[in-house]
Image (cartoon, rainbow, N blue to C red):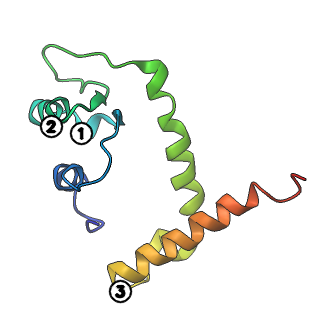
Amino acid sequence: MTGGEASDYTAAEPFMTIPVTTPKALLADKGYDGDRFRESLLIRGVLPIIPPRSNRKVPEHPDYRRYRDRNRIERMFGKLKQQRRIATRYDKTVLSFESFLNLAAERLWLKSFVNTA
């Protein structure tokens, strides 16, 4: 978890070294487009699906059909940020903030099961 003023790009590399099941692909925005980061993903066997930055000399075009799935993630974060406690981050510790994020995500998830029977 990085601070609000810090770039998420700095936390991406340590996050990928966590010993869990290796994902098949990584969906990310233009901020993560870097040669070193792409190479480290490919070495780990992860397909980078990252659109190129506008100043890239040789743009690598991702599978835009798969990149569209990233919209679901962005919509979920938009719904989470509608809750004032998450948008303004009142919690002082990382543990309490992440715990409330989990509760808020579960609340959104449970709404999909209401009246489905």
Depth check: give the residue in front, 107 or 23.
23
Which disc, if any, is residue 37?
2
Residue sitting at 28 percent across and 29 percent down? 48
Contact (CB < 8 A) between labels 2 and 1? yes
- Name the side, left or right, on which 116 lies relative to 103: right
Give the alpha-carbon distance from disc 2 to disc 1, as whole Å: 7 Å
Residue sitting at 18 percent across and 52 percent down? 17
Residue sitting at 83 percent across and 59 percent down? 114
Residue hosting label 1:
32
The picture quadrant where one finds residue 30 is: top left
Q: Position of residue 79 (x, y in %)?
A: 60, 57
The residue mark sitting in front, 2 or 1, is 2
Does the rendering let one see residue 55? yes
98 versus 60 height, above or below = below
Residue sitting at 50 percent across and 45 percent down? 74
Disc 1 marks a residue whose amino acid type is Tyr
Element under label 3? Answer: loop
Disc 2 marks a residue whose amino acid type is Phe
The picture quadrant where one finds residue 38 is: top left
The numbered mark, 2 or 1, whose residue comes first in the sequence reads: 1
- How many residues crowd mark 3 within 10 Å: few (<14), some (14–19), many (20+)? few
- How many residues crowd mark 2 within 10 Å: few (<14), some (14–19), many (20+)? some
Element under label 1? Answer: helix
Give the alpha-carbon distance from disc 1 to disc 3, as whole Å: 28 Å
Residue hosting label 3:
92
Give the alpha-carbon distance from disc 2 to disc 3, as whole Å: 31 Å
The numbered mark, 2 or 3, whose residue comes first in the sequence reads: 2
